[in-house]
Image (spheres, rainbow, N blue to C red):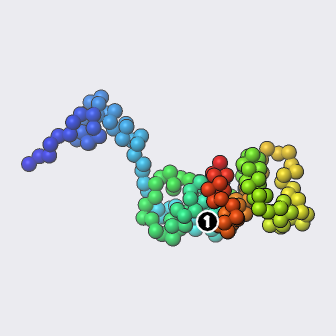
Amino acid sequence: MSRPVPAHGTYARYQRDCRCGLCAEARREYARSYRHSAPAGETRRHIARLQEAGLELKAIARLSGISERQVNSIAHGKHRRVWETTEGAICGVPLDALSANYRVPREASDRMLDLIVRVMTRGDVAAAFKYRRPWLSFTAKRAGHVNSLTWLRLCFIARSLAARGLLPADEVEKAIGS
Ligand SMILES: [Zn+2]
């Protein structure tokens, strides 16, 4: 007994070898909308390499734009497959990300600092940065960017303040995502 033939203009009909215009369009639509997944192994191995290079999961999350929770669960082998976009984002983080001179727009770091100084003095932030003087040298520069390490440190400080309930977590995550 043969299955009923799907209507024209459906991907199912295209799969049944119809190449008419409607089915070809359905195939294009399918390709556009379909999110492809890949085995998680390569992503997991790249996370391990990044960790060996000194990057914490938090930093990998920040640099890839993938949530820390997800990076963490991939790292612990909880996913057999990941979206290709996730794989691309994580595998795209270079092993020298910490030493590389990543640049983050100054407006983003200023926004983050504005959040942090609601609950910490600038002197305390400088101390957290292990600066010897109680002022933040990166804010003195007229540059339109700060380097990745400065940005990551600001994110860590803001997140730890949020974790202690001192800053609204949603505002911190919004500032990190911007
Ligand atoms: Zn057709």
Residue 168, image x and y in percent?
65, 59
Task: Evaluate whether residue 162 shows in this view.
Answer: yes
Residue appearing at x 42%, y 54% in the figure: 37
In-image side of 147 versus 8 (left or right): right
Instruction: Classify mark 1: helix, strand or loop.
Output: helix
Residue appearing at x 46%, y 58% in the figure: 82
Residue bearing mark 1: 57
Q: Quadrant of residue 144?
A: top right
Pick whichever, 67 or 81, lies toward us.
67
Residue 115, image x and y in percent?
73, 55
Task: Evaluate whether residue 99 shows in this view.
Answer: no
Residue appearing at x 43%, y 56% in the figure: 38
- Residue reaching furthest left? 1
Q: Quadrant of residue 9?
A: top left
- Pointer 1 residue Cβ closer than 8 Å to ligand 1: no
Residue appearing at x 29%, y 30% in the figure: 22
Tell me how many marks there are.
1
- Residue reaching furthest right? 133
**CA neighbours of label 1 inside 10 A, class few (<14), some (14 to 19), many (20+):** many
Q: Is residue 86 above or below residue 50?
A: above
Q: Amino acid at mark 1?
A: Leu
Pick whichever, 175 or 99, lies toward us.
175
Residue 87, image x and y in percent?
51, 56
- Residue reaching furthest top? 21
Q: Is residue 8 above or below residue 129?
A: above
